[in-house]
Image (cartoon, helix red, strand yellow):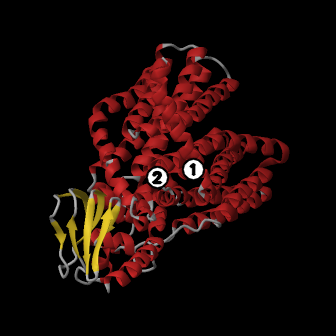
Amino acid sequence: MLAALGPVRSRLTESFRALHGAFRNPAIRRIELAYAGSAIGLYANSVAVSVYAYRHGGATAVGLFLFARLGASSIAAPFSAALADRHRQERVMLAADLIRVATVAGTAVAAAAGASAGVYVLATLTSIVATAFRPAEASLMPALAATPEELTAANVTSSTFDSVGAFAGPALAAFLLALGGSTAAFAAVAATYAWSAWFVARVHPQRRPEGESAGEEAEGFAAGVRAVRHEPRLQLLIGLYGAQTLVAGAYGVLVVVVALQLLGLGSAGVGLLEAATGVGAIAGALIALALAGRRRTAADLCFGLFLFGAPLLAIGALPHVWAAVIALALLGVGNSIVDISAVTLLQRTVPAAVAGRVFGLLESTIVGALALGSLAVPLLVHVIGVRGALFAAGALLPVLTLLTRRPLGNVDMGATVPDEQLAAVRSVAFLNALPLQRQEALAAALTRVELPSGATLFSRGDAGDRFYVLADGTLAIELPDGVKHEAAPAFVGEIALLRDVPRTATVRAETDALLWALGRTEFLDAVSGHARSRSAAESVVASRGALFGV
């Protein structure tokens, strides 16, 4: 038994080490603290506006306002998210925070003045602006994370803070609504966005030089649509995430119907069931962190999707309070696992140049699916009853999981590269300075080269077409004043590429050697496009160039 627990304990240790490493990274830590403020503000603002609408127009006003707000946000998301590809992501996040501080402060003034129309317009504008924040954060994170585990750990932290925000935000709003009314609640929301802005303003990641932007960045969000249309893996991930949020929208209504109609718990019962889901969500973040060590993120996504749907089937089959509490706790676990695994897979699959726009399309899909799911439940309950609606909503994700299990396995393979290729990239100091996403792209582009002892890799005067990383064996570098020996790990071929000159030395295999080759275009695009990597590479070239007489 203890032996069987060994691998699990090892994965947990590695995962918690990655979580600790993520928080030791100052940029990631500040982004996460900013996200916490944004999440608390988002949930608190939603409750404050909904209560304000109910007091001034009843349930009809709440429903109409939510539909209008979600619809406007869904339409705006692809366009606002495109800003993350045209501008520095941290600046987009900062601008979104500062605008939200202003709009929510304006909402507080409108509420104090009794201007209901102003409250609704400004609250809708706040939601629209918010659609730029999350895509920018999601597309920035791969540039900050040093390892795949650190990226997953960062997403776990974001998901946990989102779950905490789902508790803390409504609690903060409820307390202030009771204490000081809508004006006080909106003022507190503005303060949470100011908190977020404070931390975002202190993030200064390494950046590619100005003017390096790919031409497609100027094409608007259509480039994101095209990236998704031409990449089946992205279509599958966004489709599955959309299906999960469709069920999440249905859950938002079903939890009320189950508490009031099916179980007869009254209003307090809604809070009980929501709390069970929230506790499960926090537990799910920890489970996702433990699963990260397996590096089977697509399998984790399948597991999360199944856990999000099956509990609704269980409640329909066994409509008891204890069963509902357990089932919805499991649903919360599934929700966190889906959020973390889906976002991680997207971050490691989507091309960096259009990441913001792809995440904007995802944001639009999520918001639209939530709205559709919440609208579908009343119709389902009317036609097939509460338990029938639970069965219909609960069956969707388990069925999709079974149908897409094999294609999802291909997504996992496409989002990761073999450890030996990634290790080869990281053995080169100036390539190790690159963001994780670029390192993985380079590792995937490597070509294996096996060189027998005595064979020539390239000769002095040859055209430089590839960069080589020596993974095993020893090379002899024939210089004008002698022979230099390089044992693995080492690299050769960078001078001809970076200086655009013929090969400066002849390189032969002194023993049987294993090398990984990287094409000229991929090498130059990666190194010249990142300030730290370019500086480190130039230092290497300067020192070696003096040795080789260049």
Helix, strand or loop at mark 1: helix
Read off the residue under disc 2.
147
Position in image of residue 386 (x %, y %): 49, 21
In three-dimensional space, the C-alpha distance between marks 2 and 1, rounded to whole angstroms, equals: 10 Å
- The quadrant in which the C terminus is found is bottom left
**How packed is label 2: few (under 14 Cα within 10 Å), some, or many (20 or more)?**
some
5 displayed left or right of 233: right
Identify which residue, 235 or 63, lies in the foreground. Answer: 235
531 displayed left or right of 459: right
Q: What residue lies at 34% left-to-right and 75% top-to-bottom?
A: 215
Q: Badges 2 and 1: C-beta atoms under 8 Å apart? A: yes
Read off the residue under disc 1.
21
Instruction: Determine which quarter of the picture holds residue 446.
Output: bottom left
Q: What residue lies at 44% left-to-right and 42% top-to-bottom?
A: 341
Identify which residue, 548 or 397, lies in the foreground. Answer: 548
As shown in the figure, which amino acid type bears the numbered disc 1?
Gly
Can you tell which mark lies on residue 270? none
